[in-house]
Amino acid sequence: MRRFGFDYFTPSRKRILAIEDAISKGDVPPALQKDALGGFVGPLDMVSSTVNASAPLLYTLSPGDEITVYYWGDLIELTSMKLKLDDKGELSIPQAGRLVARGMSLPQLQKAIQDQLMRVYGKNIKLIAALDKLKSIQIFIAGEAFRPGSYSVSAVTTLFNALYACGGINENGSLRNIKLLRNNAATTVDFYDFLMNGDKRPDIPLQAGDIILLGRTGKLVSLDGEVGRPAVYELNTNETLRDLVKMANGIKPSGLTNRVHIQSVISHKEKAVVDVDLSGNVPSADYELYDGDMVMVEPIIPEVQNMVTLSGAVKVPGVYELKKSMRVVDLFNDVNQPWGDALLERTDIIRLDKDRKTTTAIPINLGKALKKDPEHNIELVSLDRVVVYSKWDVKFYPARIVTIQGPVQRPGDYPRSEGMRIRDLLLMAGGTMPGSLNEITISKARFYSAPTLITVKADLLEKGDESQNLFLDDEDIVMVRSDSDFLERPRWVNISGEVKYPGTYPLMGKNYKLSELVQQAGGLTKTANPKGAVFLRRSDHLPSPEQMSYVQTVNKIVNELNIVDFKRQSVRNLVLYQQEAREPAAQPPVLGAGIPVISTGTDVKQAAAVGMAPAIAQSAGQLSGNLLAAFTPGSGVSSEGRTLTEHQLMQSQRVIIALEKGLEGGSDNPDNITLMNGDSIAIPQKTDTASVIGAVLNPVTVNVSTPQKVKDVIALAGGYAKDADKEEVLIMRVNGSVTTGGDSRYVETGDVIYVPTKVVTTEIVTVADKIINAVKFTLATAASVIVFLALIH
């Protein structure tokens, strides 16, 4: 915490430190302002400096002062003259003589010069006198100053100006014990009077040779908490706790006055904690403080105490002031009354216990309390909560709504009022719509029984038959039945192309068939190609968005499984590759390369045969292994599974139909499909050509009026290209279906044969190479066996 008044001199200290820093670096800034506050630091900076300042009205003239005088009159033009007080303090006025000005103030001098000139020129002379230049005086600042020393300042400089010029006090200086020494006399100044009250009376004008002595600080006491100006204050000997609080602008309303906490000392013995009551004009307010004491004014309890809370089924719930001797009935008036659904028989007062944590519920009868029954109209205390319950809070009541559904203008939920009937609800819902049936069903359900269905007749209800206009209960559901065959607006289908009357036709009912539409359009023309009919259905009649969402989810799972399988296959290929790298190349047996044999009477040939036997057996094993390896899969290269795009997962609006079979008619004919709103059928003209595209030498369109096979059509296109995938040829049929294209399959008119490409790879070591190596090894092994047999025989 900072000392009070110390920050007043902060700007002056910063300026002084900045100038000193610049001087230490060899950069002496010019003093642009030549007054007592313009940046002078010490005596050496102020020698022969001219000081500009405005003179106060009570300034006393002395030798060296320069004055400018302006005068004019009825017969005299504006004239100016410059005057200077000589060493005797006198002025020489041209044509008017000499005048003693020493000791005069500026207004006095102005009056004296005016009188002098009026004796010469007459009575109507006006005059203004102003100081033109002030002299500098030398003063001294000593003691606990921030920068003590000798200062050359303006003759109009005051004590406070000089304090600011030197940077004020240092950490040990006192603002309450400032002495001005002049002519062997001392004047004591308390700077607190100026800082706290703006009192400038102690701001004494300085004279040449004055000494300002800043004494050491007295006792310092810190005051913190809920006061107007927390700080560290300097106290004089006779000042007490009361004076300290007054210096800090008193205690805030939020401060606790009956217990001001002081950390003090018992003189020359020990530290102590003292609590002082400042709530009134009590003697404890004059508690004596010591240097280093810390005073804390604690805040009052932050929670509001003088209140009660009213909540629940009342018109104006909220927080209310707790007045003296306030009772339950005092919370209510003409404006604030319980609502009609309030449960007057039971209201609770939640009261805080003495431990300030737990509560006690006090039940009362609010109806009796409002009649001022003393047993229930109890007196309220601080922080009571009065809770008025609604009858809906303590007992189950069904929601006071009824629901109407079906073909009405405004279906939905409606509030139920007492005596509400079916006709009232129909009126609120805007009446029935076209397409409604004559039956209206009312569903009544209660927890203790099964739902009850009641049917009334709409025509009788409209005629005023009150037997049909039943009363409605809470949560009843009224269903106006609708005719499923009724269409609010016409529905249509479109047929174009090779029919006699193409165009848009109304959908004649919900069971309108394909054959009926073609018949209504005049039938097919002679040039029609029914196999190529393009049938399109609107997306809102195709698989639902929920189904497509399932497809997206399954596709995501498959993609994740493909990633796992790719990683597994990559690891497997790596292991197989490492095994192949470790297996040595097979070598045929070498004659005589068996086990060394020492003959001891046995035939030499037989001994050699014995030595060759292990090598021949080993070679036979290698031979079988090589033959098996030639047909066993080795290491390979794996690629990641392809991720299907959103476009590839999009469902097609084209429906593949067999128009020729569908035109045979009959409601049981599966090819005679039922039409839906917005269906579109386009029947193309018959054509005699088919096309070949893709990996062929020359994509062409050929005449297939006579039946031809796939291989014959591809031959007309120059045959397969080298990168053609012959096993995956596809035939795009004119009806929109896609089939595989084997060489022997026949091509129909309008078909498109698509030959895809494939990745062409060449094995470094083919199966044939492996078989040739195995055969070579077999021949060498067979020769070794022949020699072996010759030796043993």
Image (tube, rainbow, N blue to C red):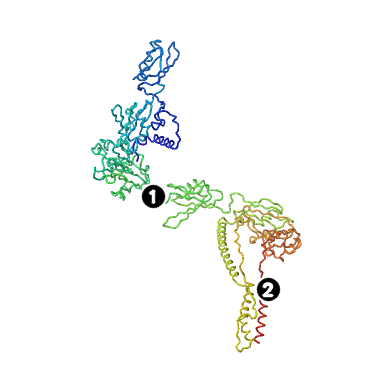
Q: Please, what secondary structure does the residue beneath circle 1 have?
A: helix
Instruction: Nearest to the eye among marks 1 and 2: give it.
Output: 2
Q: Is residue 177 above or below residue 595?
A: above
Across and down, in percent, residue 322 comes to: 31, 41
Identify which residue, 193 or 276, lies in the foreground.
Answer: 193
Judged left or right of residue 4, residue 481 is right
Judged left or right of residue 150, residue 457 is right
Q: Amino acid at mark 2?
A: Ile
Residue position marked by numbered label 1 in the rendering: 392
Point out which mark residue 522 bears: none
Q: Is residue 600 above or below residue 99?
A: below
Q: Please, what secondary structure does the residue beneath circle 2 have?
A: helix
Q: Amino acid at mark 1?
A: Trp
Residue position marked by numbered label 2 in the rendering: 772
Question: What's the CA distance linking mark 1 and mark 2?
Answer: 97 Å
Residue at screen point 38% across, 28% down: 153
Across and down, in percent, residue 621 comes to: 61, 78
- Quarter of the image for residue 238 reads top left
Across and down, in percent, residue 424 comes to: 47, 46
Q: Is residue 199 above or below residue 626?
A: above
Quadrant into which the C terminus falls:
bottom right
